C-alpha cells in the first residue's frame, strides 16, 4: 500500500468511521448540523470583533504617543509612523462597527 493509502485508511478509521457510526445511531438533517455549527462561528465572530476594536483603540493611543515623540524629535519618529498607526487604528475600529451596522456583513445587491 502506498503512503497515501495508509494516510487515507488512517483518516477513514480515525475521523470518518466514528462520524458515520454516530450518524447511523443519531440521524440528523443538514439543517441541524448547520445550526450546530453556527454557535461556534458566532463566538469566533464576537471574539474577532472585540479584539479588533481593542487593537484599533490601542493603535490610536499609540499614534498619539508617537506624535508627541515626533514633536520632540522628528528624526527619531517619522510622521509616516504616526499616519500609519492612525489609519490602521481607524480601519480596525470601523470594520467591526460596519459589520454590526449591516447585521450580517456585506450583502451585495
Image (cartoon, rainbow, N blue to C red):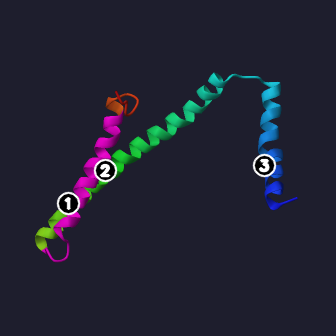
Position of residue 106 measured from the top left corner of the image (x, y, whole percent): 37, 34
Q: Give the left or right position of residue 2, taking residue 67 as reference.
A: right
Is the magenta region chiefly helix, strand or loop?
Answer: helix
* Tally of marks: 3
Q: Which residue is mark 3?
A: 11
Name the residue rendered at 27%, 52% in the picture.
89
Q: Which residues are magenta?
A: 73-99
Is 59 inside the magenta-drawn segment? no
- Quarter of the picture containing the N terminus is bottom right
Task: Compare residues 39 and 13 and report the one nearer the observer.
Answer: 13
SS for dot 3: helix
Q: Are marks 1 and 2 in contact (CB under 8 Å)?
A: no
Task: Compare residues 95 and 62 and report the one nearer the observer.
Answer: 95
**Distance Cα–Cα, label 3 vs label 1:** 50 Å
**Distance Cα–Cα, label 3 vs label 2:** 41 Å
Q: Which residue is mark 2?
A: 56
Name the residue rendered at 77%, 36% in the picture.
19
Q: Is residue 108 above or below residue 53?
A: above
Residue that protrudes farthest toward the right in the picture: 1
Position of residue 34 measured from the top left corner of the image (x, y, whole percent): 60, 28
Name the residue rendered at 25%, 48% in the picture.
90
- Quarter of the picture containing the C terminus is top left
Name the residue rendered at 19%, 76% in the picture.
76
Amino acid at each position: 500500500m502506498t503512503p497515501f493509502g495508509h494516510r487515507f485508511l488512517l483518516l477513514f478509521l480515525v475521523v470518518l468511521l466514528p462520524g458515520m457510526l454516530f450518524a447511523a445511531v443519531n440521524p440528523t438533517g443538514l439543517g441541524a448540523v448547520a445550526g450546530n455549527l453556527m454557535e461556534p462561528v458566532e463566538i469566533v465572530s464576537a471574539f474577532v470583533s472585540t479584539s479588533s476594536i481593542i487593537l484599533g483603540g490601542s493603535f490610536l493611543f499609540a499614534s498619539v504617543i508617537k506624535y508627541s515623540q515626533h514633536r520632540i524629535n522628528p528624526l527619531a519618529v517619522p510622521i509616516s509612523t504616526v499616519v500609519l498607526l492612525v489609519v490602521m487604528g481607524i480601519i480596525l475600529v470601523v470594520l467591526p462597527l460596519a459589520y454590526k451596522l449591516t447585521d450580517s456583513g456585506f450583502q451585495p445587491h
